């Protein structure tokens, strides 16, 4: 059956040349990070099909407007992200993107697509300049032009095109002010969805605005799975898990092969003590998208909790194979390895996590605990690094206080014990440790007060 889609092709420019100048690990990690970023953004916009082609992607979207919004955000986000992945401008990996709207056909009983629209989109992408989005006249005819900045590039002869010559246009940006200024009466469900997806911040006001956008989209189109899913994310962030669950279930009902909805629902199930149900939806997310590294990592954690060491190890390794620069996977795998007695390999993964994210508080904390038995100075350094990144990290304050206490740095230890108590006032052991320290400092009256509090908490 033929369906009309907006086909988006992406490609990393000068990929082969860069590969010859930098280490294989560097380029592999960079491509994996591009792939992760691209898939994450595409999931927010509800792509209906994807195919990774080595150093680029094919995505299919139902709407030309959605495809354009996704493409422009991908270019902007990749510009920002890749600065941290290669050592200098000579090793840069810009992206080019092409889009065409047209007829596509799904191969029988397979999630594979063919069609003239795909071939044209690929040729359009090949014509694009680095860090630009080129589109055909067909796309331009379908999008809401007043909210875009664009200009004509040239007339091109595209190999395999049924037209001898085709005008191509560069879409530069979305005018979010023009979109925001549009009266609500003129807004379509898609307009509301795109407005919500374009909100970048996560403070209370921005979350409320994004929620309003998805709710308005669903008022106009109740069968909008992407709006249900994204609204579920916002509701869960606001603490309304019951309403979030309803939205995820609606998204899955409307689109049973929606990997992100399965994944988001699985997290909610896991957080509400339904791990068996969560595993079902993590597996369904992976069935829909086999390279879904976030789902692999969450499943690894479940297998570890169930005592299935083999499956946990396999899922950790698979997540890191697909995304070598996945800091959270390195950290969690390090915890797993350390728990099972492989301290040397655990240290390697903590180091790799911190190489990717030097401000990763949890990795600093876990590495510090591993180091305590053999290098007190290094352990102290990593506890302090964790607290620089996360000043409200109660466990790091407590552990650093214990370490300083044992070193004899009583004044600094006292300060960290007090901070830990302020952040975590119901832990009796911290009160007891502080009481012992105060005795050493000759402050018996205060020591007695904290000891009594420890006993109250222990007996309560």
Image (cartoon, rainbow, N blue to C red):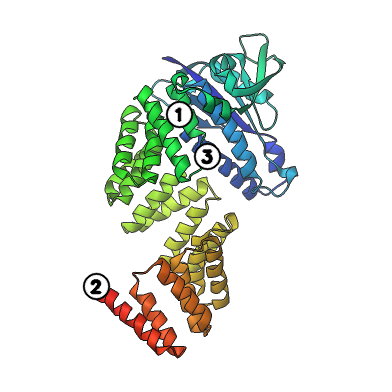
Front residue of 144 and 303: 144
Nearest to the observer: residue 42 or residue 181: 181
Q: Which residue is label 1 attached to?
A: 193
Which of the image's four quarters has the N terminus?
A: top left
- Residue 88 seen anywhere in this rendered image of the structure: yes
Residue 91 spot, x, y in % from top left: 72, 44
- Residue at the farthest right position: 90
Residue 47 visible somewhere in the drawing = no
Tell me the CA gap for discs 2 and 1.
50 Å
Q: To which residue does mark 3 refer?
A: 200
- Residue linked to disc 2: 460
x, y percent for residue 187: 46, 21
Q: Secondary structure at mark 2?
A: loop
The furthest residue to the left: 460
**For mark 3, does the 10 Å Cα neighbourhood hold few (<14), some (14 to 19), or many (20 or more) residues?**
few
Give the crowd class for mark 2: few <14, some 14-19, many >=20 residues within 10 Å. few
Q: Residue furthest bottom?
A: 442
**In front here: 383 or 214?**
214
């Amino acid at each position: 059956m033929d369906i009309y889609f907006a086909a988006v092709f992406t490609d990393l420019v000068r990929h082969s040349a860069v590969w010859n100048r930098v280490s294989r690990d560097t380029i592999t990690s960079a491509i994996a990070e591009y792939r992760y970023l691209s898939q994450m953004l595409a999931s927010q916009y509800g792509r209906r099909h994807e195919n990774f082609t080595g150093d680029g992607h094919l995505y299919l979207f139902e709407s030309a407007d959605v495809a354009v919004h996704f493409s422009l955000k991908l270019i902007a986000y990749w510009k920002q992200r890749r600065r941290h992945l290669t050592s200098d401008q000579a090793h840069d990996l810009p992206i080019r993107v092409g889009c065409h709207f047209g007829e596509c056909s799904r191969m029988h009983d397979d999630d594979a697509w063919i069609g003239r629209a795909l071939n044209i989109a690929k040729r359009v992408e090949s014509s694009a300049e680095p860090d630009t989005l080129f589109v055909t006249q067909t796309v331009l005819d379908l999008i809401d032009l007043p909210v875009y900045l664009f200009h004509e590039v040239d007339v091109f002869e595209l190999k395999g095109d049924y037209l001898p010559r085709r005008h191509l246009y560069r879409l530069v940006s979305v005018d979010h002010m023009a979109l925001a200024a549009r009266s609500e009466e003129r807004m379509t469900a898609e307009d509301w969805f795109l407005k919500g997806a374009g909100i970048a911040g996560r403070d209370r006001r921005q979350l409320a605005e994004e929620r309003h956008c998805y709710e308005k989209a669903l008022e106009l189109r109740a069968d909008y799975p992407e709006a249900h899913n994204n609204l579920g994310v916002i509701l869960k962030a606001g603490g309304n898990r019951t309403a979030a669950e309803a939205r995820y279930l609606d998204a899955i009902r409307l689109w049973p092969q929606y990997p992100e909805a399965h994944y988001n629902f699985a997290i909610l199930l896991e957080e509400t003590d339904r791990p068996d149900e969560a595993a079902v939806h993590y597996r369904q997310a992976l069935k829909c998208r086999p390279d879904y590294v976030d789902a692999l990592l969450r499943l690894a954690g479940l297998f570890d909790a169930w005592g299935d060491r083999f499956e946990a190890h396999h899922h950790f390794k698979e997540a890191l194979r697909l995304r070598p620069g996945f800091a959270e996977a390195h950290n969690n795998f390090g915890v797993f390895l350390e728990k099972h007695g492989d301290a040397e390999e655990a240290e390697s993964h903590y180091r790799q996590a911190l190489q990717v994210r030097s401000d990763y508080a949890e990795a600093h904390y876990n590495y510090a605990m591993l180091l305590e038995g053999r290098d007190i100075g290094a352990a102290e350094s990593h506890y302090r690094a964790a607290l620089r990144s996360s000043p409200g990290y109660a466990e790091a304050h407590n552990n650093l206080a214990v370490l300083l206490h044992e070193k004899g740095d009583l004044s600094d230890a006292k300060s960290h014990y007090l901070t830990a108590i302020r952040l975590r006032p119901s832990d009796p052991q911290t009160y007891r440790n502080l009481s012992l320290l105060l005795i050493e400092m000759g402050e018996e009256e205060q020591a007695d007060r904290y000891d009594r509090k420890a006993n109250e908490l222990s007996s309560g």
